Amino acid sequence: MESLKHIKTKKLKNIAIFGKSFSSEQTPYLQQLIDKLEAYNCDLLIFDTYYGLIKDHVKLHRDVGLFKFHKEFSDTADLLISIGGDGTLLDTITLVRETGIPILGINMGRLGFLSSISKDEIQQAIDSIMHKEFEIDERSLLRLNTDFQLFGDLNYAMNELSILKNYPSSMLAISAWIDDRFVNSYWADGLIIATPTGSTAYNLSCGGPILVPKSKNFILTPIATHNLTVRPIVIPDTSKIRIKVEGRIKNFLISLDSRSETIDSTIELRIEKEQFGINLIQMTNKDFYSTIRNKLKWGYDIRN
C-alpha cells in the first residue's frame, strides 16, 4: 500500500472517476466536477459503463481514458472519485484493492455517510485536494477465508460480513469461536461481523454500538436473536473468528458488503483482519463526530 505521507505530497494529476448510475438532475454537478478537474489540467480516466451513461450529458474538452478492471487504472491513477452514494463507494474497494489509491466520495444519493462530499461542495473539495488541504482516513477491512474461496480474490469487506437465513420461516444456529475459544451459539435470523466503518451501517440498525474509525476492533451483532440475554460483543481486530452454521434448512446467505453468495452448512467461515486498508479522503473541516451528529442526528437534543 502506498504510504500516507506520499499520498499527501504527490501531485494528483491522473484522476479516475467511478459511478454506477446517472440521472439528468446530476448533470450540472457532474459538469462542475469535470470542468474543475480540467481546469487543474488533470488527466481523466472514467469507468467504462459510467462513461456510457454520462457521455451525452456532459461536455469533455479533453480526451479521456476508459477502464473496466482493477489492472487498467491501478498503475496510473493518483486518486479515485466515487460518484453516487455509500453503496457506490463500497464497490470501489474491489477496484482499488491493496494499491492505497485514495478515494473521494461525492454523494449523489440520500444519506452519504462515507461519501461525505455533498454535490454543493464539489468545487470547494477539488480546490482543497489540489492544494493538499485534506486528511487521509485509513479504514480497516475484514477478510473471509473458506476452503472453497467463495468470493475469489475479492474476499474482503469494509463494512461487514453478514450471515443471513435464506427463508423467512427458518432460524439459524450460528456457533462462533474467537481464537479457537467457543463464544456462543446464536439462535437468530443471522449474525453481523462489522468493522468500525460498518458499525454505523447494518450493525447500528440491529442494535450494535458505534465505533470510531480508528478503533482496532470487530463487532459481533446478532440479527433478531431468539435469546434476550445475547447482546453484541466488541473484540480486538487481531482476533481470528471461526463460524459454523446449522439449521433446518441447510442453505444460507453470506454477504461481504453488497456481494452475496448462497452456501451450505458444511462450509466453515474464518474471518480475520485484512492485511491492507482503504484510504478515504476527508476534508479538514469535517470529522467522524460531526458526521454522526449531522447525518445520523446522534445526540440530537432541543436543548443543544
Image: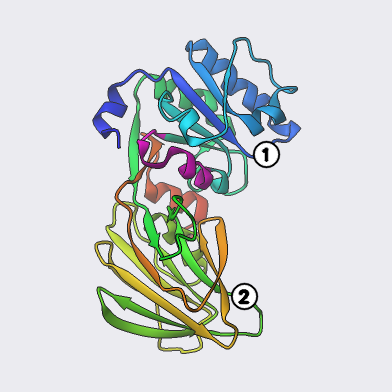
Instruction: Tell me: 216 left or right of 52.
Output: left
Tell me where the magenta segment starts and ends, as one range. 89-102
Based on the picture, tell me whether residue 99 belongs to the magenta stretch. yes
Residue 303 at least partly seen: no
Q: Secondary structure at mark 2?
A: loop
The Cα atoms of the two marked residues, 2 and 1, are separated by 29 Å
* x and y percentages locating residue 9 in the rendered image: 28, 22
- Left or right: 128 with respect to 46? left
Point out residue 144 in the picture as x, y percentages from the top left corner: 40, 61
Residue situated furthest front in the rendering? 148
- Vertical order, 269 against 49 (above or below): below
Instruction: Give the crowd class for mark 1: few <14, some 14-19, many >=20 residues within 10 Å.
Output: some
The one nearer the camera, 34 or 120, is: 34
| Few, some or many residues within 10 Å of mark 2 (<14, 14–19, 20+) | some
Q: Which residue is mark 2?
A: 166
Q: Quadrant of residue 279?
A: top left
Which quadrant of the figure contains the C terminus? bottom left
Image: 187 above or below 14: below
- Residue identified by numbered label 1: 21
Residue drawn where x is 29% and y is 33% of the image: 2
The quarter of the image holding the N terminus is top left
